[in-house]
Structure formats: C-alpha cells, structure tokens
Image (cartoon, rainbow, N blue to C red):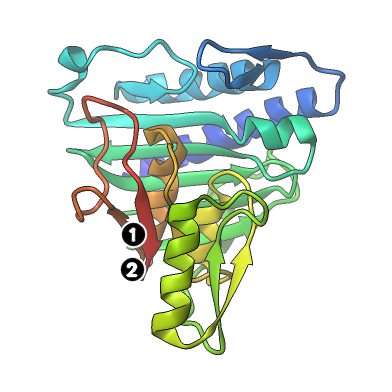
Amino acid sequence: MKENLSIAIRAALDAGAEILEIYDSDFEVEIKKDDSPLTEADKNANIAINTYLKTTNIPIISEENKQLDYGARKNWQRCWIVDPLDGTKEFINRNGEFTVNIALVEQGTPVMGVIYVPVSKTLYFASKTLQTAKKITLASEATAVAYILEHAEEIRPQAPTDVIKIVGSRSHLNKDTEDYIATVAEESKKEVAIVSKGSSLKFCLVAEGNAHMYPRFAPTMEWDTAAGDAICRMVGISVIDQTTQAPMEYNKANLLNNYFLVRP
C-alpha cells in the first residue's frame, strides 16, 4: 500500500505540473459529447497519471480513458479511479479551484485517496494503512515523496460551534439542497453558512474542519468523488449514498453516483 501511495502521489504531482503548463498558456476548449469541457491540460494530465499507474498492474478507470463495459470490470478486486483534472470549468475560469484526483478502490471501497491542488501546491492524501489523512503545501512538484510522507500533517474534522458550515453553491442551490439546509437550521437551532468551493476541494473542506457537511444532491461521477471519499473516511467522515443509505460504492455497473451526503 505504501508503494502504491508513493506512486499515486508522484503521479498527481506530475499531472499538476502538466496542468500548470497549460494553465499559463492561451489554451483551447473542446466540448465533449456529454457537453462537458475538455482542454489539453485534461489530456496531458491523464497521460502522466496513466504512465505511473500502469506500472502497478492495477486496472484504471479514468474520466479521460475509454470506459470499459461492466462485464469487463465486474470481477476487478482492485482498481484505480482517476479524474486527471477535476473542475475543468474552474480551470477555464482560472479561479484555482481545480484538482487532480487519484483513488485506489478495493472491492468497491476507496482505501486510498490523493488530491492535489496545482495552483496552491497543496496535497491531501490518505490510506487505509496510514489510518488517517494528511496535508502538505509544497515548494514545487519536484518535492521528494519521502519528504512529503515525513512532513505532511494530519487533518481532522471539527464539530460546529455557533455556525454550521455547509458546502454548496452561493448562487445555484437546487431545491433539494435548499430544503436540506433549512432542515439542518431548524433541527440544530443554529446559524447555517454556505461555504462555496470547486471540485473535490469540497470533501477536503469537511475533512480538515473548514466545513461541517457537504450535501451533493446533483449528478456526479465516481472519479469526482472516490479520492475525496477516501480522505473523508480516514478521518471518520461518512459519505452516504442517499438512495441506499449506505456508504458509497465504486466500480459500479453505472459509474454515475447517486446523490450523497458527507458528514460526521
């Protein structure tokens, strides 16, 4: 597990470097069949990550790889789940709130997660072996993994005091989310504040105590959530499928997630 974590960290950092090269250029934007945007940064980051992960001989599910039918995936005991550039819209808008997501899944459960934020050079990672999640801000993507593993600091969620911070959108909350927030406010008798953030950073906010819950009552894919789910699980935060009322599962027949709720 430690070797795979080291490989995943190195892959995320190199992908981040590839992303920043494009970020600082006059890049073009393509539109995929599902109407989502695609840039050269997505493609280059995906190549970098696949180059590293293929050395593990563990199959890879990536947003930018050709998706295999479930018949070819259903007997996988382990797989990587990757979003080379989570938050392409944030990347295009140049607001810095985009990430590289790499997760290792065993029998449907995320057991390792790596999230890298290229603009701030902030790295989050967690694994079943560590039994915790850690965070470090780097001087550069060339930082040795051994240094990262030694110097990263543990993160922990925090219980709300006077204000409950809920991750969401300030301007585009759907009715299901608005109803949930209203219920939390009524039941807790506390003030509720909305904390807005892009990409998988939403999971990180809860895991490190800068928010207290994250209701996602809108479509996401497995590669959007697997790494953040792993990081949250390792600090005692639940990521609950709102259809099954059980922890989220991965490498499903349909890679589209149900609505979910992230909270202690």
Badge 2 density bin: few <14, some 14–19, many ≥20, Cα 10 Å: some
Does 211 sit above or below residue 203?
Answer: below
Instruction: Residue lying at the far left in this picture: please name it.
Output: 75
What is the secondary structure assignment of the residue under circle 2? loop
On the picture, is 142 further left or further right than 185? right
Does 245 sit above or below residue 182?
Answer: above
What is the secondary structure assignment of the residue under circle 1? helix
The residue under the point 28% across, 38% down is 105
On the picture, is 196 further left or further right than 110? right
Q: How many angstroms separate mark 2 from mark 1 (CA)?
A: 5 Å
For the C terminus, the image quarter is bottom left
The residue under the point 12% across, 23% down is 75
Number of callouts: 2
State yes or no: discs 2 and 1 in contact (Cβ < 8 Å). yes
Which residue type does callout 2 highlight? Gly
Q: Of the numbered discs in the image, which one, if any, rests on residue 236?
A: 2
The residue under the point 42% across, 55% down is 231
Q: Position of residue 139 (x, y in %)?
A: 75, 50
Does 261 sit above or below residue 220?
Answer: below
Seen from the viewer's position, the closer of residues 32 and 6 is 32
Q: Position of residue 11 (x, y in %)?
A: 53, 31
Q: Is residue 21 visible?
A: yes
For the N terminus, the image quarter is top left
On the picture, is 19 further left or further right than 102? right
Seen from the viewer's position, the closer of residues 208 and 94 is 94
Seen from the viewer's position, the closer of residues 84 and 123 is 84
Q: Is residue 156 visible?
A: no
Which residue type does callout 1 highlight? Arg
Q: Of the numbered discs in the image, which one, if any, rests on residue 233?
A: 1
The residue under the point 43% across, 37% down is 219
